Image (tube, grey):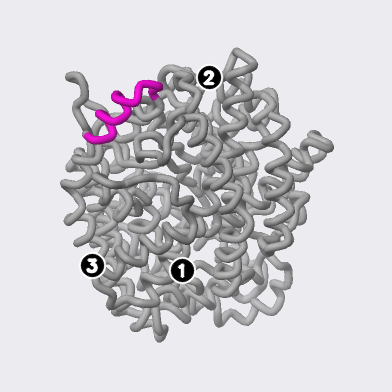
């Protein structure tokens, strides 16, 4: 695949150390005149190129910082961009948006791609407030603090230091005493940071509420829905989704957990039992080390579609992968799009578990999406909504299942891995509803106390949980379990998309069972649209519907149970 970059506007040797390095490009764009539609389109391409260059520069600063949160130089580089460069970019970008919005040639841009783009520009102008620039920088800095705190959460067990991700294998150990010992070490370590994280979140809520008020909104939730360009659904749709999950998925989730509990022979789980196998089987070890994980995933992708494998090979060749968990590394996993080169970066914390396999495939799905859209005309067309992005990743998880024998040589292990993943899908939907419902309440009630926040979180556990776990002695595990969800701190309101997209992914998977070749072709065609069509049209092109109604959820739940029974 082509990996060279050809620029038409920004200097190839541009180094961004300060706003002064970037300002001339904004000045040129603002001063430029155009008298024909073609000249206007060329101007839009230049602006798009500048956007891509700047976003990619910030991306690399973020990537380096999260790969090693102890690297002070990387942290300072990221902070410099957020605090000293980005505020000027925000102000200048608003002026650019105003110029775009007032162009006499917009009436001639009748295709849906440009219409969506212009709608996003109009929304950005509506939301822009000068006084919110420093507040947004403050929120990003607080999120950076969160990442550093979580990245430093390690334990020492039998003389070895482990990250939270690396402890996962011990929490799956058949020996309950080992599970308990490791869990308690991690629990005690996390307790040390409760007050720090509560302080950060208090500040985030306050800052975000102020941002919303400045922009003329009653609360940050309503502000964020517009800021995220949620043109295809509203708040009530989310609330209806919560109710449908509670009614149709939670009972299935509870039944699955009851069966596991019966096999264990316990009255109740303890929190260190939840990841273990009730039949006492040792945890699966699908790979050892990041290199083997990559090699096996490339093999799996090759079997599904050679193009998918080529994407990962290209990323590996360019060094766009950081897969293994290590001390000082930020939590979680992501595929960071790099809009100029069009070849993204995958970051994750692999520790040799089946969950890591899913994460790698998931982020690989995002990566394929980036490749499929890299040649679209404008950066805005490549910046697709999360509901579409997660369709790419979650569908890939399910589409690859037939080829998981690459990770699991024994048929029994393969069946176990598939069964575990389908059960995880059922379990994750209530968690998505929980996190999303929590955010709605948090920002509708911005003046809440910490005790009120804790009480509401616990009430959601009653609503969407099973009630089968005994947290006595570990009460803070239950009360502050949301601290581990980085989305709440770093990307607020980005979570409901996982639920909506999971439903779409199940549809893609169902299509593949009936006709795999056709399903993959449709999947690729849908993703290749980027954000040149609305969400419903993209889903339709991918062969599924953007449908999160109770009827659809109930139907998919029944089908999922059927698949599980076959396994």
Structural distance between the alpha carbons of marks 2 and 3: 43 Å
Quadrant for residue 370, please give it. Answer: top right
Q: In this view, does 339 lie to the left or right of 15?
A: right
In terms of sequence position, does the residue under pointer 1 or pointer 2 come before the other? Answer: 1
Q: Is mark 3 on a helix, strand or loop?
A: helix
Disc 1 and disc 2 in contact, CB within 8 angstroms: no
Q: Which residue is drawn at 58% across and 24% down?
A: 298
Residue annotated with mark 1: 29
Percent position (x, y) of residue 169? 38, 26
Q: Which mark is residue 294?
A: none
Answer few, some or many: residues within 10 Å of disc 2's Cα (few below 14, many 20 plus, some between 14 and 19). some
Image quarter of the C terminus: top right
Residue annotated with mark 2: 295
Q: What element carries label 1?
A: helix
Q: Is residue 498 magenta?
A: no
Image quarter of the N terminus: top right
Residue 275 appears in the figure? yes
Of the residues tagged 1 and 2, which is closer to the observer? Answer: 2
Q: Is the magenta stretch mostly helix, strand or loop?
A: helix
Percent position (x, y) of residue 86? 32, 62
**Range of residues picked out in magenta:** 173-184
Q: Which of 40 and 150 is in front in this view?
A: 150
Percent position (x, y) of residue 18? 25, 57
Q: Nearer the viewer, residue 151 or 560?
A: 560
Disc 1 and disc 3 in contact, CB within 8 angstroms: no
Q: Residue at x 25, y 37 (%)?
A: 186
Q: Is residue 302 left or right of residue 344?
A: right
Disc 2 and disc 3 in contact, CB within 8 angstroms: no
Residue annotated with mark 3: 203
């Amino acid at each position: 695949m082509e990996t060279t970059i050809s620029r038409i506007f920004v200097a190839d040797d541009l180094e961004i150390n300060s706003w002064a390095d970037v300002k001339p490009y904004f000045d040129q764009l603002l001063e430029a005149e155009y008298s024909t539609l073609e000249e206007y389109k060329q101007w839009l391409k230049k602006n798009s190129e500048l956007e891509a260059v700047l976003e990619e520069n910030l991306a690399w600063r973020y990537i380096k910082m999260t790969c090693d949160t102890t690297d002070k130089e990387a942290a300072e580089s990221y902070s410099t961009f957020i605090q000293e460069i980005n505020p000027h970019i925000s102000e200048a970008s608003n002026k650019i948006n105003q110029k775009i919005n007032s162009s006499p040639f917009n009436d001639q841009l009748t295709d849906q791609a440009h219409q969506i783009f212009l709608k996003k520009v109009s929304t950005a102008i509506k939301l822009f407030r000068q006084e919110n620039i420093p507040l947004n920088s403050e929120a990003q800095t607080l999120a950076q603090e969160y990442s550093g705190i979580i990245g430093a959460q390690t334990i020492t067990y039998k003389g070895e230091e482990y990250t939270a991700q690396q402890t996962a294998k011990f929490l799956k150990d058949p020996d309950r005493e080992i599970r308990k010992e490791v869990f308690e070490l991690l629990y005690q370590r996390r307790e040390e940071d409760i007050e720090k994280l509560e302080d950060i979140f208090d500040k985030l809520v306050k800052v975000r509420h102020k941002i919303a008020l400045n922009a003329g909104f009653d609360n940050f939730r309503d502000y964020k829905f517009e800021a995220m360009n949620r043109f295809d659904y509203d708040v009530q749709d989310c609330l209806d989704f919560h109710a449908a999950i509670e009614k149709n998925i939670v009972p299935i989730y509870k039944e699955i957990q009851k069966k596991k509990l019966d096999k264990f022979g316990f009255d109740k789980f303890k929190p260190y039992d939840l990841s273990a196998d009730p039949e006492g089987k040792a945890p699966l070890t699908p790979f050892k080390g990041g290199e083997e994980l990559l090699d096996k995933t490339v093999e799996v992708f090759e079997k599904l579609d050679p193009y998918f494998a080529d994407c990962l090979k290209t990323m590996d060749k360019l060094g766009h992968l950081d897969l293994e968990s290590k001390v000082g590394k930020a939590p979680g996993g992501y595929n960071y799009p790099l809009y100029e080169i069009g070849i993204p970066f995958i970051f994750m914390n692999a520790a040799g578990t089946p969950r890591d396999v899913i994460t790698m495939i998931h982020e690989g799905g995002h990566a394929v999406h980036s490749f499929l859209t890299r040649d679209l005309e404008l950066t805005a067309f490549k910046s697709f909504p999360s509901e579409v992005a997660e369709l790419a990743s979650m569908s890939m998880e399910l589409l690859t299942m037939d080829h998981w024998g690459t990770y699991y040589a024994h048929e029994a292990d393969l069946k176990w891995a598939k069964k575990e993943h389908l059960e995880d899908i059922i379990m994750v939907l209530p968690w998505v509803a929980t996190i999303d419902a929590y955010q709605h309440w948090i920002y509708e009630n911005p003046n809440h106390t910490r005790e009120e926040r804790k009480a509401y979180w616990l009430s959601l556990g009653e609503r969407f949980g099973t009630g089968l776990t005994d947290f006595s002695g570990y009460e803070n595990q239950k009360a502050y379990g949301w601290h581990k969800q980085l989305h709440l701190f770093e990307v607020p309101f980005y979570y409901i998309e996982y639920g909506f997209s999971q439903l779409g992914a199940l549809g893609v998977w169902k299509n593949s069972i009936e006709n795999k070749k056709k399903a993959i072709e449709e999947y690729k065609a849908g993703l290749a649209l980027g954000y040149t069509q609305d969400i419903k049209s993209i889903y339709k092109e991918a062969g599924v519907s953007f449908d999160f109604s109770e009827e659809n959820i109930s139907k998919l739940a029944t089908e999922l149970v059927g698949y599980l029974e076959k396994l």
